[in-house]
Amino acid sequence: MTELKAPSSFFSQTVWAMGSTAVIAVAGAILTFWLAAFSGREALGVFNQLYAIYIILGQLFAVGLNDSTLKHAAQHREDAAERDTVFKSALLCALATGIIGGIITFMLSGPITAVTESDSVGDGIRFIAPAVALFVINKVLSNYVNGVQRMQYYAVTQSMRGLILVVLIIALSVYEAPMSAFGLAFIGAEAGVLLCFFPMIAGAFNATTPAGGIGRWTRRHFAFGIRALPHGLLTESFFRIDILVLAIFLSDKDVGLYSFVAFFIEGILQIPYIVRIVTTPHLIRIMEARRLDLLGRQALRSIPASLVTTVAASGFVFLVFPHLLTWFPLVADPRAPEILGILLLGACVYAAFAPFESVFISGGRPDMQSLFMMAVTACNVILNFVLIPEYGLAGAATATAVTFAVSSLLLNLLAFRTFAILSWRRTP
């Protein structure tokens, strides 16, 4: 293997990724404020419940193929033939599981109506079924471009999803479509992203692959992906567990209030998430080389970029939030600032370790990545079920914030123990 050096392009990749996050944040702000101002808490609650279900089911039916694509595309980035085989086989796998996932999602409409006691949410599931199928394919495509470090492509496609979604939701609201029709916007957003990837898809299928390569990599993708599935599923579910548990205990209006506050947190959390997206391809190569000095240098790039920016953004949001409430009387509530403050504290703790959250995937141990996320999610679920009945919305916020702190400690403990990091080489 050629000598591995700390990446010189980390800053430019982060700028591109942050730029896409800014576009998504603005689009999300427009969408949230529009629904809060013109449609009210119930519409905001229905939208966020549909969004949570859509993301969770999409990640479930991706079957970890996205993580396998990221890992192996980065690993074989210098070998064009092998890289193309990795990509083509992953797309074929995603097409199959996506279609199956879309069919199953459609069949879940009745059970979800019964659990949420909301006809709008249940009916909306039928609309998001095709979007789930497209989401699975787009997830693999996005992770591939991340793995080969084409961050400009990644940034544009992710921005496209957010922009299309906000335009379609506002259009549905203006034409007074039923709230269940919000699901149509997800289909439009995923279809738009897929169109952006068409040149890359065409190139992959025109590429010549070695005999037997597709079958070999199909088996490897599923073997890796199934072990990584709990990680991918629970990572996407983690930030929506509180909303889903609230939907069981409280009304759509209360879920809408919490969703309004959670929107700001989700925006803040995009900062450490984007730093992790940029860090992971580099981390894969560092883990392969087992170089302690390079790991330290990467930490000095990633952790400050995540933590300092998150703290600064959190402080700004906390200061301006009370003024925003006066503009949106339909969601104004004295409980909102308390919920926000609790969640912001948790987000700042999370930002310190988030860039390296995919360390087990990077090191070829998807089983440990899944074990980590299972433990973290179990903590979050238990705390939500314990605290929400007693403390309501504040209980949901506290459960999520405490889980952030627990996950930080657990990640470091498991990573250092699993990879014996302190025994790595310090120089080539």
Image (tube, rainbow, N blue to C red):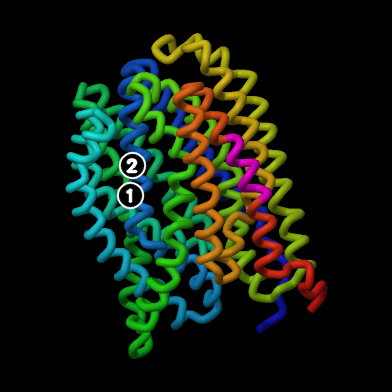
Farthest-out residue, right: 426
Q: Which mark, residue 57?
A: 1
Which element carries disc 2, helix, strand or loop? Answer: helix
Q: Is residue 117 above or below residue 427?
A: above
At x 56% / y 39%, what residue is drawn?
A: 269
Q: Is residue 40 above or below residue 99?
A: above
Q: Which mark, residue 53?
A: 2
Q: Amino acid at mark 2?
A: Ile
In the image, 426: left or right of 135?
right
For the C terminus, which image quadrant? Answer: bottom right
At x 26% / y 56%, what residue is drawn?
A: 101
Place residue 252 in its image quadrant. Answer: top left
Range covered by the magenta-colored residues? 401-409
Q: Amino acid at mark 1?
A: Leu
For the N terminus, which image quadrant? Answer: bottom right
Farthest-out residue, bottom: 211
Q: Which mark, residue 146?
A: none
x then y, percent, for residue 211:
34, 90
x then y, percent, for residue 109:
20, 41
At x 49% / y 22%, what residue is drawn?
A: 390
